[in-house]
Image (tube, rainbow, N blue to C red):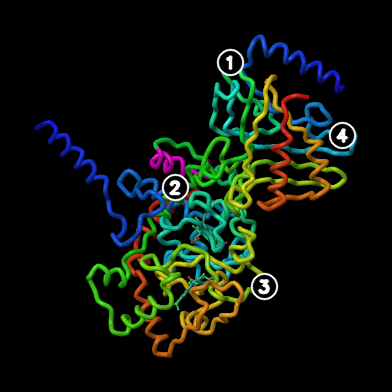
């Protein structure tokens, strides 16, 4: 009996020490296992170094962070369309990289099914980093910096594509944004202003069906009534499924940190939130495959529009944007011996 | 030439019954002979590369599973040792079942290693998914077939079941090409025609001449 008690206490302690909260209790269960304990610290740091190191590109000039900047919630804001190697221009706008642990399919059209294999796309894309996986692994093996980092992360210094990719995944899974004013209000640490509250109500009525709280996306593919971009002729989800009703459907993007991620939409066609809202109030509801959530007219006065924007701004998470843990890892990547090399 | 090949097969059959085999060989053939890469055949066709994934190999005696190997193996005609699957010696079986390609669960597993390492060139980087089979060469004009796709309606994963008396499974490339070249010389992504090609491939494997 006494033994039984001690044993169950023991298991209770183990269970308790394994439960580390990485996100608020009103978030759903993530799709990826999150482990940010001291055991995975070195793996995260390896992933962070890889994310910021242009070694992943053919001429060592472009890193993941060239297109995904921490100051823009890991989106890209200088250009509507992403700029890659030799200044080549991509066909889409780089999305924010936050709360990826909850996302099932990646890219605007869901072309990628797992965060691990996402990095293969930019690395090998001729207009992005234009490098082969083989060469990347070769370069990592031959740069003094990496074998010790892989050893710290994995226990030995073997470098292969799986280890590189899993490290990038681990770093990107740590990019959880959950400390906006909206979150503080939900946790009763703050309150909305009158205007923000009005905006919240409008949001719930018109936008929440697709940009569903608390992650501000339903992670589905929807057609929000944009006309096709005549340059890229990008049909979105149709490219993957080849089903006509999927034509012009794109992944519903999260609106968290939306104040930092301009320009907006898959092709970056809108620079300002006000233009986005004006789009939603003027959507052509006759548009063939438009999602049913938008098949009616959205009427908003100019006051309504400012209220809605003031609510959207409460989704900005300054703590995330300025979190030193997410930034360029100077200590690792700017080691003196690397500079003198 | 053909007759000689048949004689070899017959000898093979003879021994396999008595000794039992310790491996199964997948053999791409051309005009009823083992395929030789980069050689120009009488029909002016040259195969430069044939690579494919075989997995979930099961050897059965009637309907009972005698041997099972759930993993995937990347077979590449350029490296003949990759065309062989090791099996235990002294087992007797009369049926084989295997998959051509990678199932959708495995396709969703993220970064894998060994034969499934994306570095092997059998992975689409711009749209997740393994390439189940690559067949490249020229026949008057160049042809490139990259057959893959795991998402419905373009799931190209196929299961093949065949009676098995020898320890060889043949894939007649010339017959396959005859059918597909008439339709298309380039397939590079999951689509309807890739589905048809996957059907054709899975129906083309045979174990008896």
Of helix, strand and loop, which one carries label 3?
A: loop
Label 2 or label 3, whichever lies nearer to me, is 3
| Disc 2/disc 3 C-alpha distance (Å) | 36 Å
| Disc 1/disc 3 C-alpha distance (Å) | 63 Å
Mark earlier in primary sequence (2, 3): 2
| Disc 4/disc 3 C-alpha distance (Å) | 45 Å
Q: Residues within 10 Å of mark 4 (few under 14, many from 20)?
A: some
Q: Magenta span covers which residues?
A: A138-154
User: How many marks are shown on the rendered structure?
Assistant: 4
> Is the same chain shared between marks 4 and 1?
yes
Report x, y in % for residue A236.
Answer: 60, 65
Q: Is residue A329 left or right of residue A65?
A: left
Report x, y in % for residue A169.
Answer: 45, 51
In the rendered image, the vertical position of residue B4 relative to residue B155, given as above or below: above
Front residue of this view, candidates B209 and A317: B209
Q: Is residue A196 left or right of residue A277?
A: left
Badge 1 is on which residue? Answer: B91
Badge 4 is on which residue? Answer: B41
In the rendered image, the vertical position of residue B74 relative to residue A164, given as above or below: above
Q: Are marks 4 and 1 in contact (CB under 8 Å)?
A: no
> Is the same chain shared between marks 1 and 3?
no
In the rendered image, the vertical position of residue A56 relative to residue A316, given as above or below: above
Q: Are marks 1 and 3 in contact (CB under 8 Å)?
A: no
> Is the same chain shared between marks 4 and 3?
no
Chain at numbered mark 3:
A
Chain at numbered mark 2:
A
Task: Give the number of the disc on residue A167.
Answer: 2
């Amino acid at each position: 009996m006494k033994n039984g008690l001690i044993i169950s206490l023991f298991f209770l302690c183990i269970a308790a020490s394994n439960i580390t909260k990485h996100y608020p209790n009103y978030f759903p269960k993530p799709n990826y296992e999150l482990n940010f304990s001291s055991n995975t610290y070195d793996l995260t740091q390896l992933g962070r170094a890889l994310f910021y190191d242009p070694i992943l590109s053919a001429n060592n000039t472009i890193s993941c962070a060239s297109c995904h900047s921490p100051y823009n919630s890991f989106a890209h804001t200088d250009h509507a369309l992403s700029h890659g190697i030799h200044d080549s221009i991509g066909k889409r706008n780089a999305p924010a990289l936050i709360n990826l642990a909850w996302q099932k399919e990646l890219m605007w059209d869901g072309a990628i099914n797992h965060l691990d294999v996402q990095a293969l796309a930019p690395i090998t894309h001729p207009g992005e980093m234009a490098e082969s996986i083989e060469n990347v692994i070769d370069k990592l093996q031959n740069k003094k910096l990496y074998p010790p980092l892989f050893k710290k992360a994995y226990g030995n210094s073997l470098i292969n594509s799986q280890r590189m990719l899993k490290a990038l995944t681990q770093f990107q899974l740590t990019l959880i944004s959950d400390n906006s004013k909206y979150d503080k209000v939900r946790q009763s640490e703050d309150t909305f202003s009158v205007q923000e509250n009005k905006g919240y109500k409008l949001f719930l009525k018109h936008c929440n069906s697709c940009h569903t709280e608390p992650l501000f996306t339903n992670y589905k593919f929807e057609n929000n009534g944009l006309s096709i971009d005549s340059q890229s002729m990008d049909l979105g989800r149709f490219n993957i499924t080849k089903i006509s009703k999927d034509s012009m459907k794109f992944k519903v993007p999260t609106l968290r940190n939306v104040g930092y991620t301009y320009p907006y939409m898959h092709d970056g066609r809108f620079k300002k939130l006000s233009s986005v809202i004006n789009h939603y109030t003027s959507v052509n509801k006759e548009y063939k495959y438009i999602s049913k959530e938008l098949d009616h007219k959205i009427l908003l006065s100019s006051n309504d529009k400012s209220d809605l924007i003031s609510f959207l701004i409460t989704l900005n998470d300054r703590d995330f944007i300025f979190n030193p843990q997410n930034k360029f890892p100077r200590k690792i990547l700017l080691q003196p011996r690397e500079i003198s090399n | 030439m053909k007759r000689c090949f048949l004689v070899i097969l017959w000898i093979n059959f003879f021994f396999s019954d008595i000794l039992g085999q310790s491996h199964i060989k997948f053999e791409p053939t051309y005009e009823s002979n083992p395929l030789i890469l980069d050689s120009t055949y009488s029909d002016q066709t040259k195969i430069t590369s044939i690579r494919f994934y075989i997995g979930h190999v099961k050897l059965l005696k009637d309907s009972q599973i005698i041997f099972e190997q759930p993993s995937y193996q990347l077979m590449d005609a350029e490296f003949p040792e990759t065309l062989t699957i090791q099996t235990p010696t002294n087992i007797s079986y009369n049926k084989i079942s295997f998959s051509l390609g990678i199932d959708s669960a495995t396709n969703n597993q993220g970064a894998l290693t060994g034969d499934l390492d994306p570095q092997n060139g059998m992975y689409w980087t711009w749209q997740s998914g393994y390439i189940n089979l690559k067949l490249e060469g020229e026949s008057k004009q160049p042809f490139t077939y990259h057959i893959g796709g795991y998402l419905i309606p373009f799931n190209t994963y196929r299961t093949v079941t065949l009676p098995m008396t020898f320890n060889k499974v043949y894939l007649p490339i010339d017959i396959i090409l005859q059918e597909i070249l008439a339709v298309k010389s380039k397939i590079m992504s999951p689509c309807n025609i890739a589905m048809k090609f996957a059907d054709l491939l899975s129906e083309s494997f045979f174990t008896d001449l």
